[in-house]
Image: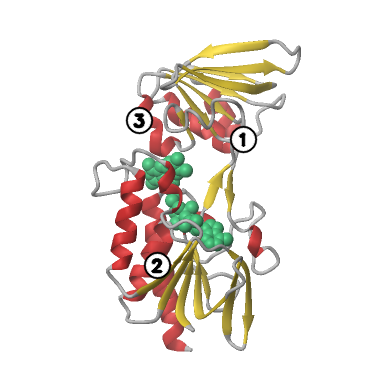
Amino acid sequence: TYDMLIVGGGPAGAAAAIYAARKGIRTGVVAERFGGQVLDTMSIENFVSVTETEGPKFAAALEQHVKTYDVDINNLQRAEKLLQKDGLTEVQLASGATLRAKTVILATGARWREVNVPGEKEYRNHGVAYCPHCDGPLFKGKRVAVIGGGNSGVEAAIDLAGIVNHVTLLEFAAELRADAVLQRKLHSLPNVTVITQAQTTEIHGDGQKVNGISYQDRSNNSVHRVELEGVFVQIGLVPNTEWLKDTLNLSRHGEIEVNARGQTSLPGVFAAGDVTTVPYKQIVIAVGEGAKAALSAFDYLIRS
Ligand code: FAD
């Protein structure tokens, strides 16, 4: 039985593991892929105190830091079910094994929804991006498209318009779905073109990096190509909580509801990082939230 079991090995899970292990308690981590989303990015320039690094390097540093402590790491293991029995929390794995713990921290992160068109995978990190806070400055002075006219797409377009030369916003539906105040702001910007009824069909490149995007105008089926250097996909961030449905309180977006201490609706179960309702999905925030959840869980342990 673990004192603290952390599900997820991204920045939030790693921070929680370090904070837990430093209390001298029996700590375990179970992760499908230790490192998490940062493994999928080449450049990280906003982790405070690290001017610039690469995702895989950052992930290796996370693992190395965790491994300096006595933490039981179960990598390449997927959690499938969480239940509570006899005052303990049980996590069942896809392998068939069951892990038991006095406290659990859920840090399973999230994933960006993809448009699934030719070119998206090929040019990921070579012009195709998902996070304006992370990658916006890489496109300074260039032309970009934002796919998606919901709040995140319109916010991204407004944000990027201040950095890049021109933004084309492509929305599939006939109207943008973002809040009116955001739409007003968007339409006031001189370097943004909004195209509705636009179904993205392909992201083009020269073999090295992105050089265009094609979309079909759904009103008349004509196909258009826009020359540009970057594409931001903003059609949703999906929290990895499918396995937790009907177990604890989730928001309507599927995020785990937590209070200011990272406590979920289940006693002894805490959550941190992109998987929670805490806004702004960033490494520096996930790390802070992971540390906080571990300290809260430790506080729970010494009181029970
Ligand atoms: P994640 O990193 O998503 O980690 C989740 C962990 O849980 C993983 O180990 C995963 O394998 C595991 N897991 C999931 N489901 C299960 C399960 N059922 N059982 C067991 N384990 C499970 N942020 C920045 O601040 N700066 C950047 O420059 C930046 N660039 C980015 C570029 C890209 C391409 C992407 C995708 C994201 C980027 N981000 C960036 C966002 C940042 O990566 C996330 O905010 C951060 O990784 C969230 O950390 P996390 O620990 O909450 O979740």
Query: Which x, y percent locates residue 63?
Result: 34, 60
Type of residue at label 3?
Answer: Pro
Q: Which one is in front, 73 or 295? A: 73
Q: Is there any visible trace of residue 148 in the rendered image?
A: yes
Q: Is there any visible trace of residue 278 in the rendered image?
A: no
Of the numbered discs 2 and 3, the one sitting upstream in the chain is 2
Type of residue at label 1?
Answer: Gly
Q: Distance between the residues labelled 2 and 3?
A: 30 Å
Give the mark toward the camera: 1 or 3: 3
Query: Which x, y percent locates residue 61?
Result: 29, 55
Secondary structure beneath label 1: loop
Secondary structure beneath label 3: helix
Q: Distance between the residues labelled 2 and 1?
A: 33 Å
Q: Mark 1 = which residue? A: 150
Q: Is residue 95 depicted above or below 208 in this figure?
A: below
Query: Which x, y percent locates residue 33?
Result: 47, 56
Q: How far apart are marks 1 and 3 (CA)?
A: 22 Å
Q: Mark 3 = which residue? A: 137
Q: Mark 2 = which residue? A: 16
Secondary structure beneath label 2: helix
Q: Which residue is drawn at 56% across and 69% down?
A: 264
Q: Are marks 2 and 1 in contact (CB under 8 Å)?
A: no
Q: Do the residues labelled 1 and 3 touch (CB within 8 Å)?
A: no
Of the numbered discs 2 and 1, the one sitting upstream in the chain is 2
